[in-house]
Amino acid sequence: MTASAESEHLFVYGTLRRAIAAGPYPELNRHARYLGTARVAGRLYDLGRYPGLVPSDDPADRVCGEIYRLRRAAHVLALLDDYEGCSARFAPPHEYRRAWLGATLASGAEQPAWVYLLNHQPAAATRIPGDDYLTYLNSPAPQAR
C-alpha cells in the first residue's frame, strides 16, 4: 500500500479513543468524523500510561480500535505526530512511527488508514489480553500500570 501525508483516514487504539479522549483528542474530534470500530493486524502492549501496537502477520492478532475520516489531515496528523513524539521536533530514535495499514471495519469493509506503531518490540511490557485497550482498562483486575 502507498499513502500520502494527506491520507484521510486514521486508526486509533489507545488514549485517543473516544472513551478516553486524552491529549489532542478534542482537535481530532473537531477535524474528523468517527466512522466506527475497526481492527488492524497487530499485538497490543501495556507501556504504563498508554498502549503500544506492534504489527503482526499472524491473522489471529487483531487490535481493536476506532477509525476516523480526517477533514484536515495534514493539520491533525502534525498534531498527532507531536503527541506521539515522532515529529521532527523530537530527536530520533522515536518510540512511535506513523505507518499505513489496512483496517477492517465492523461491517467487514477494508479501509487503509494511518496508525501509530511502536518502533521496537517491547522487552518488558505486558501483552494486553484480547488486544483491546478499553476492555483491558475496564477489566476488574487490570495489570499494574
Image (cartoon, grey):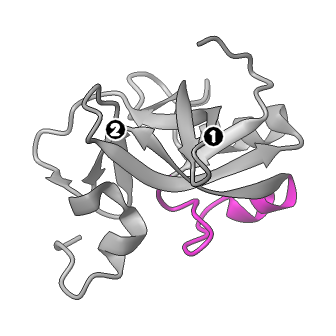
Q: Residue at x 21, y 77 (%)?
A: 142
Residue type highlighted by circle 2: Gly
Q: Which mark is residue 54?
A: none
- How many marks the image carries: the answer is 2
Which residue is farthest top?
2
- In the rendered image, residue 59, in percent from the top left (x then y), is placed at 29, 34
Q: Residue at x 16, y 50 (%)?
A: 125
Which residue is farthest left?
124
Q: Residues within 10 Å of mark 1 (few under 14, many from 20)?
A: few
Left or right of residue 7: residue 106: left
Foreground pick, 40 / 48: 40
Residue type highlighted by circle 1: Ala
Residue annotated with mark 2? 42
Q: Main secondary structure of the magenta part?
A: loop
- In the rendered image, residue 118, in percent from the top left (x then y), is placed at 36, 35
Whether residue 79 is situated above or below residue 17 in the rendered picture:
above
Foreground pick, 140 / 123: 140
Magenta-colored stretch includes residue 84? no
Magenta-colored stretch includes residue 14? yes
Residue 139 figure quarter: bottom left
Mark 2 residue element = loop
Residue annotated with mark 1? 109
Residue 30 figure quarter: bottom right
- Point out the image quarter for the N terminus: top right
Whether residue 24 is situated above or below residue 102 in the rendered picture:
below
Mark 1 residue element = loop
Q: Residues within 10 Å of mark 2 (few under 14, many from 20)?
A: many
Q: Which residues are magenta?
A: 13-31
